Amino acid sequence: MVNVASGLPIVLHHVAASPGGVPVLHGIEFTVERGGRTLILGANGSGKSTLLRVLHGLISPSAGAITWAGHTARPRTQAMVFQRPVLLRRSAEANVRYALDLAGIHGMDADSRIAEALAEVGLRGLAKRFARVLSGGEQQKLALARAWALRPEVLFLDEPTASLDPASARAVEAIVTDIHDRGTTVVMTTHNLAQAKRLADDIVFLHAGRVVERTPAQAFFRAPRSAEAAAFLEGERL
């Protein structure tokens, strides 16, 4: 299990968010508990990425409040991986080291974490290669390695396989599953229903910036409770 000071649960209290002055989220009541894999689904423009950024503390609510383990300050026990990873003009190894430096992790501890994280994602042999010449799948694996090296309590993933080929996507899914199995809570957005079925413990369904449904994954896919979710699933199956 991951041994960190807790930043869970994350609780949104009637949150609204208007990034760039545009209202996106409305009246969100939502809690992230420890240990699960929560997948956020919804049509394009429903607010999935905005919700993820609010949970991670990258976007502040325009109304309502968010707390992490009862506190209003965002903890350092979480990490986020984006659809298009932001990588430095450095080697794969140096990209991971930079994240550890920011977290105050140096010396032999950093060295061992870097080696373990790169091995975990299958990039140990590419440690010295410049990150920006890696393939798309390798870059996403590096982003996961950089996040995993921090030993996050919560890992946020914003459609991490959306631009990858099927083989690379399944490799990323396997890494995410392994990180979760080691004790990290996962919150992830996706537009891929098959992926959601493979990975999710529970589903949060967004429609027009509101949480319409929060349901265990099997129940959601078997019999969604809302008309909006039923229409979304039917449309994706067509």
Image (cartoon, rainbow, N blue to C red):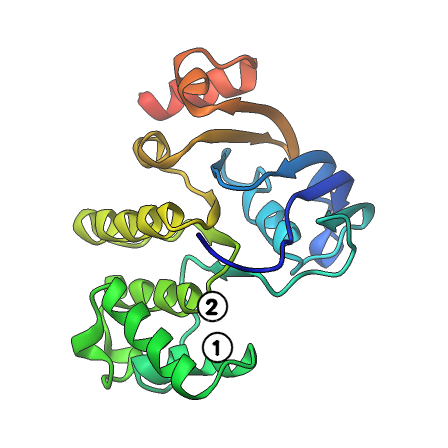
Q: Is residue 61 visible?
A: yes
Q: Determine which residue is flagged by label 1.
A: 99
Could you tell me residue 61's position as x and y percent? 77, 51
Q: Is residue 88 visible?
A: no
**Separation of marks 2 and 1 at Cα, in angstroms:** 8 Å
Q: Nearer the viewer, residue 194 or 92?
A: 92
State the SS at label 1.
helix
* Residue at point 24%, 79% (across, down): 133
* Residue at point 46%, 82% (across, down): 98
Q: Is residue 68 above or below residue 47?
A: below
Q: Is residue 169 above or below residue 204?
A: below
Q: Which quadrant would the C terminus be assigned to in this image?
A: top left
Q: Determine which residue is flagged by label 2.
A: 150
Q: What is the quadrant of residue 137 in the picture?
A: bottom left
State the SS at label 2.
loop
Q: What is the quadrant of residue 48 in the picture?
A: top right
In the rendering, which numbered label is found on residue 62?
A: none
Q: Are marks 2 and 1 in contact (CB under 8 Å)?
A: yes
Which is more N-terminal, label 1 or label 2? Answer: 1
Q: Is residue 54 left or right of residue 93?
A: right
Q: How would you rate the neighbour count of disc 1 (Cα within 10 Å): few for under 14, some for 14-19, many for 20 or more? A: some
Could you tell me residue 204's position as x and y percent? 54, 31
